[in-house]
Image: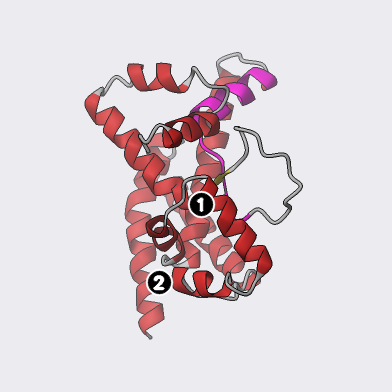
Amino acid sequence: MWFQNREETAIRRLENFYVPWFQTMGQQSFGDAKAIFDGMIQKARADSKKSQLPFADADGLLRLAQTDDRLRKDLEWKKEEGVTEQDLHWWWDMLGLERSILFQTDHFSRLTHFSALRTQGHTGDEAFRLMKQANAIYAYFVWNSNDPRDENYPLPAELRDRVNRRTEREMFADPSGTQWTTLRDSFCSFNAFVRHEIKAGRI
């Protein structure tokens, strides 16, 4: 019962935020925006059933990483990328359903932006390049240690909140977004920009 109430509360909170967001971001009617959200909830529930993680929260992840080499290596990567224990708790203490919704809305944002760029006349390659400059790409885990990891590589999902808060601060300081966009677009991708800002201590 406690878990069910927690999930219902999370769904209401997410719905109150994302349905209006879909209406604005994707220029959707309320009905269409609500249908998009309901579809995401269904997918999130299916995802959580399929991906039964061997831990329930950040503390469980940290304990398991002491004996699981794969998790330990992944945590080492996350820490190298700037993830703190506070970041781990922010991400892994939320419900799996919430994490799935965040990933799905990130995908929706990237797809909407790409489609808008194509509508403006950009080629597919140009639209993809511009979309990557404006949108972060995150990953849950990195299981393959042989993956080439350059500055454009997916960021640890645990960084999402800090990145968003930095963006919000910049947009509050300069509502036009000119300074933020100019700085961001001086990098080949948003992920490269984030890595630079983390090293500089600004995220």
For residue 112, which numbered disc appears in the image? Answer: none
Percent coordinates x, y for residue 48 in the rendering: 57, 69
Q: Quadrant of the C terminus?
A: top left
- Which residue is drawn at the image coordinates 52% and 45% (left, top)? 81
**Residue extending furthest bottom?**
1
Q: How is the image coloured?
A: secondary structure
Mark sitting earlier along the chain (2/1)? 2
What amino acid does circle 2 point to?
Glu
Magenta highlight on residue 86:
no
Q: Residues within 10 Å of mark 1 (few under 14, many from 20)?
A: some
Q: Does residue 81 appear left or right of residue 50 in this picture?
A: left
In the rendered structure, which segment of residues is drawn in magenta? 125-141
- Which residue is drawn at the image coordinates 23% and 26% (left, top)? 173
Percent coordinates x, y for residue 146 in the rendering: 76, 47
Magenta highlight on residue 129:
yes
What amino acid does circle 1 point to?
Lys
Return the residue at label 2: 7
Q: Secondary structure at mark 1?
A: helix
**Residue 27 in view:** no
- Which residue is drawn at the image coordinates 60% and 67% (left, top)? 46
Q: Residues within 10 Å of mark 2 (few under 14, many from 20)?
A: some
Q: Toward the viewer: 75 or 163?
A: 75
Q: Toward the viewer: 44 or 28?
A: 44
Q: Secondary structure at mark 2?
A: helix
Return the residue at label 1: 79
Percent coordinates x, y for residue 109 in the rendering: 50, 38
Q: Quadrant of the N terminus?
A: bottom left
In the picture shown, does residue 68 fall above or below 74?
Answer: below
